[in-house]
Image: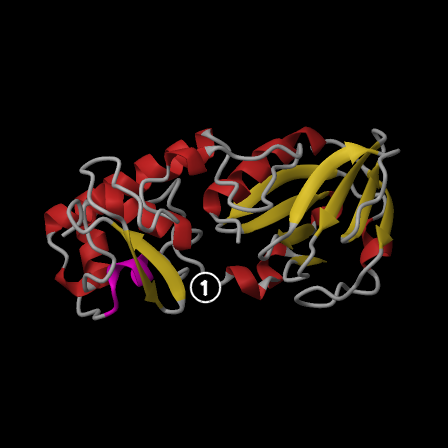
């Protein structure tokens, strides 16, 4: 599933659409995570795209007349800008024909994505999302307060969307490696120093990931159809059995909350 760096990269590569107008809408498949509304095409036609924002892992297209189009890429979704004469691809579920002659195509093989239209405040998906790790990280003291009394592992806390919106499995593992903290460490037992290291690692890892266009583990691409390159810098994620690039110890894999988790037994304590 695309995480915050991938979604932010997609947002930035969608910005050239600002000022364009939706001239036509073709919905080829309504059955996504939530069915696409029957009137989506009618309501979108003639709307001008006035901005593209990100809220955690969600994209928000600000439209003329005050509404927004909410998009979530799910596990395998993509939003790609292409020429209007491009050959249709399998799993191209929604196509927006734009006044500039371009098309914005929503492709999603597993159909776990989301596309809906409405007022921003009406999207329940956005109501319980925590702080954005790129723009409003808590202080170390605030993080320790959030962790106080919690027995859940620190990796699970980093992935709790009600605390920090947008961090998923890949980046939680990478952040904890750079912070030198094991993923199973109880969140409530973090010291002030460890909390500060986690925040510093969050800024570093997410910032570098965005600069490199995210991680293309399988089929992720940005809106220009280009892959990301941060996977080249992964220190632990998906590196089970390989030597740590810092100390040479063998990277281990464990399962936490049904997700593969990777760490270095020497660099993380």
- Magenta-highlighted residues: 152-158
Q: Magenta stretch: residue 97 in it?
A: no
In this picture the colour scheme is secondary structure
Residue 178, percent across and down? 24, 41
Identify the element where label 1 is drawn: loop
Mainly helix, strand or loop, the magenta region? helix
Residue 215, percent across and down? 48, 40
Q: Is residue 30 visible?
A: yes
Q: Is residue 163 visible?
A: no
For residue 234, side relative to residue 226 (left or right)? left
Residue 51, percent across and down? 64, 37
- Of residues 232 and 121, the one drawn nearer to the viewer in this rendering: 232
Q: How many marks?
A: 1
**Residue located 20% across and 39% down the image:** 248
Q: Which residue is mark 1?
A: 128
- Of residues 46 and 107, the one drawn nearer to the viewer in this rendering: 107
**Residue located 27% across and 49% down the image:** 251
């Amino acid at each position: 599933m695309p995480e915050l760096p991938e979604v932010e990269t997609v947002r930035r590569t969608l910005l050239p659409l600002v000022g364009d107008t939706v001239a036509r809408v073709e919905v080829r498949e309504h059955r996504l995570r939530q069915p696409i509304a029957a009137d989506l095409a009618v309501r979108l036609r003639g709307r001008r795209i006035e901005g593209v924002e990100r809220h955690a892992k969600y994209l928000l297209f600000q439209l003329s007349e005050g509404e927004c189009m909410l998009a979530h890429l799910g596990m395998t979704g993509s939003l790609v800008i292409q020429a209007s004469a491009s050959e249709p691809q399998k799993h191209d579920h929604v196509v927006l024909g734009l006044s500039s002659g371009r098309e914005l195509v929503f492709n999603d093989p597993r159909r776990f994505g989301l596309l809906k239209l409405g007022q921003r405040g009406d999207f329940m998906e956005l109501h319980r999302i925590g702080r954005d790790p790129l723009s409003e990280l808590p202080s170390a003291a605030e993080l320790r307060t959030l962790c106080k009394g919690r027995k859940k592992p620190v990796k699970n806390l980093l992935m709790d969307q009600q605390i920090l919106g947008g961090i998923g499995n890949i980046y939680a593992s990478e952040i904890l490696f750079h912070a030198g903290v094991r993923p199973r460490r109880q969140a409530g037992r973090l010291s002030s120093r460890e909390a500060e290291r986690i925040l510093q690692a969050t800024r570093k890892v997410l910032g570098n990931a965005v600069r490199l266009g995210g991680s293309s583990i399988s089929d992720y691409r940005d809106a220009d159809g280009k892959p990301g390159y941060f996977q080249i810098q992964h220190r632990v994620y998906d590196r089970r059995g390989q030597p740590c690039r810092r100390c040479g110890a063998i990277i281990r894999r464990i399962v936490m909350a049904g997700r593969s988790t990777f760490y270095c037994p020497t660099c993380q304590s």
